[in-house]
Image (cartoon, rainbow, N blue to C red):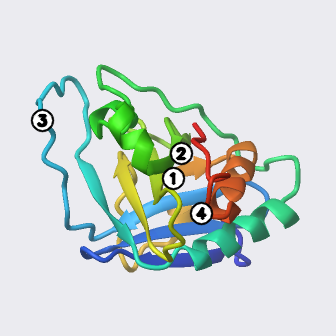
Amino acid sequence: MSPLTHVLVVPVSEGGELIFAHTLDSGIHVGMRGLTRPVDERPRRLRGVAAPLYGGTIRDMHPLRDFVADFVEHAVDESTVPLTAGRIRDTRLVVARTSLDALSSRMHFSYRAMSPLHTVGPWDGAAAELLLSRVRGLDYQHMGFFATGLPELPADAASDTLPAAVISRERAEYLAEYLQAPAGQVLHHLT
């Protein structure tokens, strides 16, 4: 990434951080640092290269909303970094792993699933996935998330030397719409 990288560190209530970064030309890079709440999945049908699933609450969604909107508004159309489509191998999608595809969940929550994310650089293991959720009809500042396969970013590592999970420009536009939607009836299910 160039020296003009825009970085947003999003604290997670349960401990740790989600890290978002962009340079306006290659999508929004996503990583995690010190997430402490792995989800105990039931039933356990994990096979192959399944990565641990983390869940939690983003304390304040407004900085993320503004960050994604800024990227969408100013990003260039052509990516200077080659993106690779992620592959899910022998693992259920994050929506199924969290049971958010059940009707009882969709009645109370609206969510945006990015599954799998594009990747940059060498990628070993399960494809990265990110799912954000909001309570329907209530205007909360916080929002839930589930993440799997995201790179763990060391505190002192340069971000341009690490493989990255990437939200492409097209997916960032859908994410911006989801984050900016009011909490009432128009907060519809976006997948």
Nearer the observer: mark 3 or 2; the answer is: 3
Question: Which amino acid type is shown beneath numbered disc 2?
Answer: Gly
Q: Quadrant of residue 42?
A: top left
Contact between labelled residues 1 and 3, with CB atoms less than 8 Å apart: no
Q: Mark 1, residues whose alpha carbon is within 10 Å: few (<14), some, or many (≥20)?
A: many
Rounded to the nearest angstrom, the CA distance separating label 4 from label 3 is 30 Å
Tell me where residue 179 appears, x and y as whole percent: 63, 62
- Lower position in the chain sequence, tag 3 or tag 2: 3
- Lower position in the chain sequence, tag 4 or tag 3: 3
Nearer the observer: mark 4 or 2; the answer is: 4
Question: Which amino acid type is shown beneath numbered disc 3?
Answer: Arg
Rendered residue at 26%/41% (across/down): 51
Rounded to the nearest angstrom, the CA distance separating label 1 from label 2 is 7 Å
Query: In this image, 67 relative to 80: left or right?
Result: left
- Lower position in the chain sequence, tag 4 or tag 1: 1
Contact between labelled residues 2 and 4, with CB atoms less than 8 Å apart: no
- Lower position in the chain sequence, tag 4 or tag 2: 2
Q: In this view of the protein, which residue sits in the foreground, 165 or 157?
A: 165
The quarter of the rendered structure image containing the C terminus is top right
Q: Which mark is residue 121?
A: 2
Question: Which amino acid type is shown beneath numbered disc 1?
Answer: Ala
- Lower position in the chain sequence, tag 3 or tag 1: 3
Tell me the residue that label 4 is attached to: 183
Nearer the observer: mark 3 or 1; the answer is: 3
Nearer the observer: mark 4 or 3; the answer is: 4
Question: Which amino acid type is shown beneath numbered disc 4?
Answer: Ala
Q: Which mark is residue 42?
A: 3
Rendered residue at 36%/42% (across/down): 105
Q: Is residue 128 visible from the viewing direction of this image?
A: no
The quarter of the rendered structure image containing the N terminus is bottom right
Tell me the residue that label 1 is attached to: 164
